[in-house]
Amino acid sequence: AQSVTQLGSHVSVSEGALVLLRCNYSSSVPPYLFWYVQYPNQGLQLLLKYTSAATLVKGINGFEAEFKKSETSFHLTKPSAHMSDAAEYFCAVNGRRGGADGLTFGKGTHLIIQP
Amino acid sequence: GAGVSQTPSNKVTEKGKYVELRCDPISGHTALYWYRQSLGQGPEFLIYFQGTGAADDSGLPNDRFFAVRPEGSVSTLKIQRTERGDSAVYLCASSLGRADTQYFGPGTRLTVL
């Protein structure tokens, strides 16, 4: 069984400030981990993914995430928030190496950027 | 190139009716997934196709839900005797193969009155 917990349904930061979105996972096997972003009225877009290579993963739009096995975490960060980052962010896990059984998503975190 | 497309974008139906939702994956993608996203929740896995066959249908909530992919490309999600609790956004994703990045469509918003 696998699960994802995203701490904070809403996160608000000022433009230019650090963005930190938290994700903890549970998986009985080494996981693949993903962050997706969903803009209003659009489909999910992949930000980045971890597939057991480097533990620090860089994605699009200046985002990155670090896989920490000891903490079962995969937190998403961005050094400086931009107004265009306002969206819903989802962390997801696939606990089966090979990825054939679909992703398990967290409930999402709504990122609000204050001017 | 073209992404994953889904039709219709919105569907309103009455309780007890039958609905079909269509997904056109990215050309050449052999894997296709269906998810359901309820308000305020993350997507929930329903079913996965590899080619024409359903490799994993463990996420289908009950036997009112069924999906097909007869030619290994377009897929249709079918819901019989719809209930108000079926109201959600139904998402389709495709990937080149197993374990590859899943690309999502914009979804079909289903409303059951």
Image: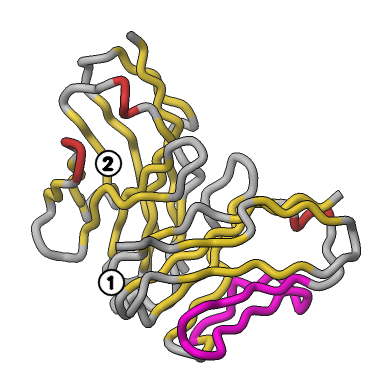
Nearest-to-viewer mark from 2 and 1: 1
Colouring rule applied to residues: secondary structure
Residue at (50% x, 90% y) in the render: B71
Secondary structure type for disc 1:
loop
* Left or right, residue B74 beside residue A56: right
Span highlighted in magenta in the image: B55-79
Q: Chain letter of disc 2?
A: A
Number of residues whose C-alpha sits closer than 10 Å to that of mark 2, classed few (under 14), some (14–19) or many (20 or more): some
Residue A18: which quarter of the image?
A: top left
Q: Quadrant of residue B28?
A: bottom left
Taking A17 as reference, is B63 above or below it? below
- Disc ID at residue B69: none
Query: Any mark on residue B100, and which?
Result: 1
Judged left or right of residue B39, residue B71 is: left
Residue A7 is left or right of residue B36, and the answer is left
Q: Which residue is mark 2?
A: A75
> In front: B8, or A100?
B8
Say how many tags the image has: 2
Residue that appears at 72% across and 54% down: B11
Chain holding disc 1: B
